[in-house]
Image (spheres, grey):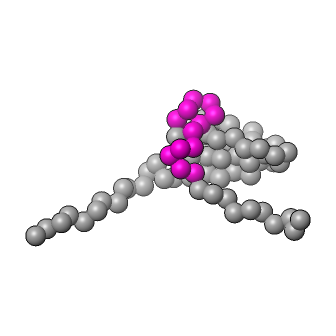
Amino acid sequence: MTGALAPVKPLTALDRCDRCGAQAYIRATLPVGGELLFCAHHGRKHIAALREKGADILDESARLSETPKIAPSDER
């Protein structure tokens, strides 16, 4: 074992919050193993305590404020 961390996979629409079932935007990887997934609301509520316990946090909640890309119109 090299001790290198595996690449973190991005969260998808299939990843659901462990508290309420909404789409997950935050992944907390626990130092003892395992992970917790949270929607932005529950992630904000628990993120400080998880960091204090040494969890590695992946926060993709900024995606909520991104402007969606619109495909170009097919003008003929």
In screen coordinates, is 76 left or right of 8? left
Report if residue 61 is visible in the image.
Answer: no
Q: Which percent across, then down, holds residue 36?
A: 69, 41
Q: What residue occupies the far left of the structure in this picture?
A: 76
Where 19 sits versus 71, above or below?
above
The residue closer to the viewer here, 67 or 34, is 34
In screen coordinates, is 14 left or right of 65? right
Q: Which percent across, then down, holds residue 27?
A: 65, 47
Name which residue lies at 61% across and 46% down: 26
Q: Which percent across, then down, holds residue 28?
A: 70, 46
Count of marks, rendered view: 0
- Segment colored magenta: 11-22
Q: In which quadrant of the rendered image does the N terminus lie? A: bottom right
In screen coordinates, is 56 left or right of 12? right
Q: Which percent across, then down, holds residue 9?
A: 63, 57
Name which residue lies at 59% across and 37% down: 17
Q: In which quadrant of the rendered image does the C terminus lie? A: bottom left
Magenta stretch: dominant secondary structure: loop
3 within the magenta span: no
Where 72 sits versus 57, above or below?
below
